[in-house]
Image: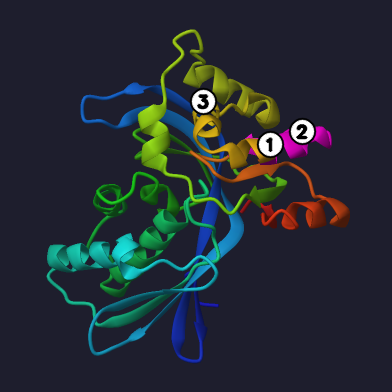
Amino acid sequence: MDKKKHIMVENSVEVILAPAKVNFGLWVKGKRADGYHDIFSILHTIDLYDKIYIEPHYTLEVLSIGPFSKSIENNIVYDAVISFSNLVGKSFDYKIVIEKNIPVGAGLGGASSDLAAVVKYLNEQLENPLTYEELSSFLSQFSKDAPFFLKGGCALVYGTGDKIKDLEPISKELTIVYPNLEASTKRVYSAFVKNEEENISLESVLKLLEENDIENIIENELQETALDIYKEIGEVIRFLESLGYKPYMSGSGSSVYVFSKLDDIIKNALTSRGWYVYECKTI
């Protein structure tokens, strides 16, 4: 393992581990004039990873492989590398292969994590011409979640998700269920209507967090909207609730998680429906 903990070397090819995240609650304050929503949310990285292989190449090439691979046209990493190259005045002749193990459209931040991992790596290769703040600003042009992944761990994100306050890590085991459904963040936010009667304050969330009461403060204000659009998310939630669990949706969906390990019978019942099950812990 390299001194940079996010980088390994396998057969002379550098390998970056890009972790997923879960949202421990997501609250929407309102829609802005630019079309984005002001939110606040507690994010935590987990030990579910995309693996990114990087090696010298005659030109820039970005490929996607693995169970949740995407075509290059749908991969923001390529566009971001080109833009970063123009910004720093340096061409990057690398073959970048992204092994997509994090489900797509799951509210787990896989694409944003890949983006942050690659751009952070390139910045380090040039001995960090961009500061952390500059790198965050650059990444937020492509994904509002991406700046969080520069450090990972546990953080409060607010504004459009691009403002970050580091928090103490929370040690939790959880099981994630992905209903094999790619939810659209844009579609969910576009359909969301704010209930003005629900107005929890950021201060009250942070106070409960300090009291280590995370499971009782989690509320995802996008969940009802996502369930109206994607019935499969509701099916997962109702199935887990029928077994006595308290499920939570991550981000804008479609994945759902519980703070528990599941026995093999339950896991088999979930996978038999075509759903994916991941046992994870926070990192």
From the image, tell me which residue sits under label 3. 221
**Amino acid type of the residue that numbered disc 2 sits on in the rendered structure:** Glu
User: Could you tell me how far apart the alpha carbons at marks 1 and 3 are, in whole angstroms?
Assistant: 15 Å
From what the image shows, is residue 79 above or below residue 96?
A: above
**Amino acid type of the residue that numbered disc 1 sits on in the rendered structure:** Ile
Q: Which mark is residue 241?
A: 2
Q: How many neighbours does mark 1 have within 10 angstroms: few (below 14), some (14-19), or many (20 or more)? A: many
x, y percent for residue 207: 59, 21
x, y percent for residue 13: 44, 86
Residue drawn 63% across the image and 42% down it: 256
x, y percent for residue 135: 28, 54
From the image, tell me which residue sits under label 1. 237
Magenta stretch in the rendered image: 236-249
Res 76 quadrant in image: bottom left
Q: For mark 1, give the secondary structure.
A: helix
From what the image shows, is residue 246 above or below residue 133?
A: above
Can residue 164 be seen in the rendering of this structure? yes
